[in-house]
Image (cartoon, coloured by chain):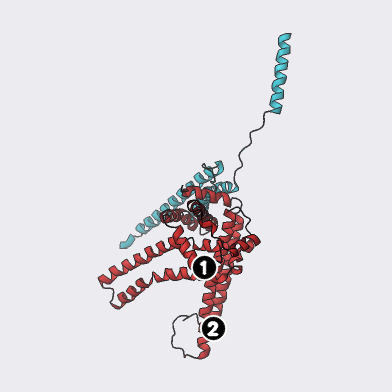
Amino acid sequence: MKTSSSELKRRAKRTLKGKYGFCIGIQFIECGILLAITLVYMLTSFSMGFLSEPFLGGGRSVSAGYVVLRAGVYISFLIILSVYGLLKPGVLKIYMNLCSGNTAKLSDLLFAFQNKPHRFIGLYFINLFIGFAWGIPYFVVLIVAVVTDFIPIMVVLLVLMYLLLLIGNIITMLYLSQSMFLLIESPDQRVFGSLKGSADMMKGYKGGYFYLLMSFIGMVVLGYCSMGIGLLWAIPYIQATITEYYLDLKERRSLDFPGRDGEVSFESMWNQENQ
Amino acid sequence: MDQDHQNDSWQETQDWNRDTIYKQPESPAQSSMALASLVMGILGIITSCCCYGGLIFGSLGILFALLSRTEDRFEGYAKAGLITSSIAFVLVVLVIIVFLGTAAMSGLGFGGVFS
């Protein structure tokens, strides 16, 4: 039987009762780390004089040192993205511990750094790439529209491509929404395996998940009305509800397909025992 | 005499029962978030004359009231917080309308767009 979204939300609120301080602290730490890295990146780029033209060549003379420094800027940008991609599983791990009744520790934030970080980075970049790939037709049409001075047919095509970008991204996001949870539960799993597992899990549940996500709009609007202060409480609540959804979905699937939970590798069992 | 004795014993039994059995009904524990919602609602009403205060406190009050609801029903404080925060929100909207109306009227007083 399907668990209603209001029941999931109630469970999330019960889980978070008395733990909002911890969750807000986690948010501050995560944002602080990202802000510090971004600031270092910006200051370094600025001091090198790249911030004015970080992506376009400009009229500079191309020397070996210049190329190396520019490559350094791009690599540090990728490092920032990677750190974000590694912190996100840590946050999810904390919420998974909270929702399943285990003790959540601050050290869980570094979960992805300790457990096959390359897989988590890979999953994060694949997600980013898929989102970007849906935008390619839109950018192509946009360039053609600019060249043809926005003739009516190009404007119509532009709108259609924008809709494709939007709908395509939403559907893909719904399919792949559980992949990070799956990878956290068994980090020895392959990245594409977790993507496939998430797509399998979400079959028949995409509408419900979309409805659940849409139901948070009011709360996010209230958060923005309070100049972002309310988001400190709203984000842990949303995160906990999403985690409750995953745990509920997993439980339902284990009832539907009892054999699947038995496919646990030695490595994940070893990790669980040593935690 | 016998009647008096019976009354006394009945009274004693009643007193004994009251002492031993009767307990002060425990008020259900209210969550701190519900209390925060009420405080935010009151602060919202007070500061609703200055738009941002009412908006910030009002929306925080509504948010806290919604987050404090862990059972089917709202707690007492949460219900009060929700009402006061909603009043704060409405007051803010009214203040904004009055402010905009006054600004428009003063603009018209100077001749509006035709000056």
Residue A195 in the image: x percent, y percent? 47, 65
Q: From what the image shows, is residue B42 above or below residue A135?
A: above
Residue A62 in the image: x percent, y percent? 47, 90
Q: Which residue is mark 1?
A: A190
Query: In the rendered structure, which disc, 1 or 2, sits on the residue that comes first in sequence?
Result: 2
Q: From what the image shows, is residue A253 above or below residue B115?
A: above
Q: Residue placed farthest to the left in the image? A: A152
Q: Residue placed farthest to the top in the image? A: B1
Residue A106 showing in the rendered view: yes
Three-letter amino acid code of the residue under disc 1: Arg
Disc 1/disc 2 C-alpha distance (Å): 40 Å
Chain identifier, red in the render: A
Residue B111 in the image: x percent, y percent? 33, 60
Which quadrant, please, contains the N terminus of chain B? top right
Q: What chain does badge 2 belong to?
A: A
Three-letter amino acid code of the residue under disc 2: Met
Q: Nearer the viewer, residue B43 or B95?
A: B43
Residue B23 in the image: x percent, y percent? 67, 31
Chain identifier, cyan in the render: B
